[in-house]
Image (tube, rainbow, N blue to C red):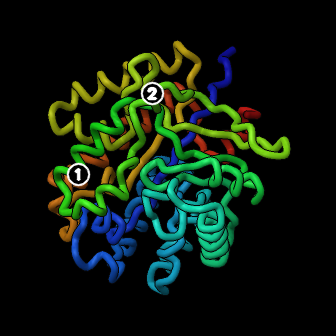
Amino acid sequence: MNKRKKSACISLDLDNQWSYMKIHGDEGWDRYPSYFDIFIPYILDVLDELELKITFFIVGKDTESEENRKYLSMITERGHEVGNHSYHHESWLQTYSYEQVKTEIIEAEEAILKTMGKRPEGFRGPGFSWSKDLLEVLAERGYLYDASTLPTWIGPIARSYYFSKSDLPEEEKKARKELFGSFKDVFRSNKPYHHQLKEGRRLLELPVTVIPVFRLPFHLSYLVYLSGISFFVMKTYLQMAIFLCKLTGTRPSYLLHPLDLIGGDMIKSLAFFPGMNIGSDQKIRVFKYVINTLKRHYTLVPISDFVRQEEL
């Protein structure tokens, strides 16, 4: 008799075109250009083909556009979970006051509920940003989990690379000085754990899983990059990650971003962005390989289902 496979969860941070432009320091981001009309139907069809339901983390600002709302509503109509990804998608969220954090969370939460018909049960900070005040607000609001940490040492290196490729002025770089975390994040747990908060409250933290022991990321952004060097190297890297996850009893929380799944051939306005020289077909090939490989070892579900099934 086969043992029941353990669960693993899949999520996608639904960062829109304007948020990538804002991160890069490009003019025109504040007109909030969107690629949802291209990306959302495209990825929903791919997920249907894979018979996969995931968690989409939604930015509240994107619900202000009537055109965006039309496409955002498709996500819940097709049976996917929604999470809160803040209202303004600012990666310096950890610098906000308690009241600013509370406003950011509640406004995004209400916008997502109104647009998509479901109240988010989880949160992920933009750029993996979080704070104690944020955790307190989430616990007070009855959130099931936070998913904002990335327990790796590579974050500051990724931040330096990002700064070197961006057009941001020095003052903006200073505001983003904690983007992608610090070297000390390597000491954070790679498995789910509970934050102990005021008045005896607790909140589950679900880290974005990194490779155990080595603490290197293996979410889709990294695998797509490796596939551009060698598909064999990408497959070997993924197999090592899964082997070490199983060896250490680490059940993956696997992360996706829109630009991991679509290339400059389809989103020409972002063709300059790192990794957009890899075509959409190649990215989907990598994605399908990753998902089918994970399926051999785990039952893949949205985050809330993962939390409840594993009784975390």
Q: Position of residue 298 (x, y in %)?
A: 56, 29
Query: Separation of disc 2 and disc 1 at Cα?
Result: 21 Å
**Residue situated furthest bottom in the rendering:** 66
User: Residue at (46%, 56%) from the top-left corner?
Assistant: 126
- Position above or below: 292 against 275: above
Helix, strand or loop at label 1? It is helix
Residue 64 numbered tag:
none
Q: Please say whether residue 233 is visible from this viewpoint.
A: yes
User: Residue at (70%, 57%) from the top-left corner?
Assistant: 137
Q: Which quadrant is the N terminus positioned in?
A: top right
> Are discs 2 and 1 less than 8 Å apart at CB?
no
Q: Position of residue 192 (x, y in %)?
A: 63, 32
**Amino acid type, callout 1:** Phe
Helix, strand or loop at label 2? It is helix
Q: Position of residue 155 (x, y in %)?
A: 35, 38
Answer with left or right where residue 205 lies relative to residue 202: left
Q: Which quadrant is the C terminus positioned in?
A: top right
Answer with left or right where residue 19 lies relative to residue 44: left
**Amino acid type, callout 2:** Val
The crowd level at tag 1 (other Cα within 10 Å; few <14, some 14-19, many 20+) is many
Judge by depth and name the residue closer to the eye, 72 or 33: 33
- Position above or below: 267 against 276: below
Q: Quadrant of residue 43?
A: bottom left
Q: Quadrant of residue 271?
A: bottom left
- Position above or below: 297 against 96: above
Q: Position of residue 74 (x, y in %)?
A: 53, 71
Residue 163 numbered tag:
1
User: Residue at (67%, 46%) from the top-left corner?
Assistant: 145
Q: Please say whether residue 302 is visible from this viewpoint.
A: no
| Disc on the earlier residue, 2 or 1 | 1
Q: Mark 2 sits on what residue?
A: 186
User: Residue at (47%, 38%) from the top-left corner?
Assistant: 150
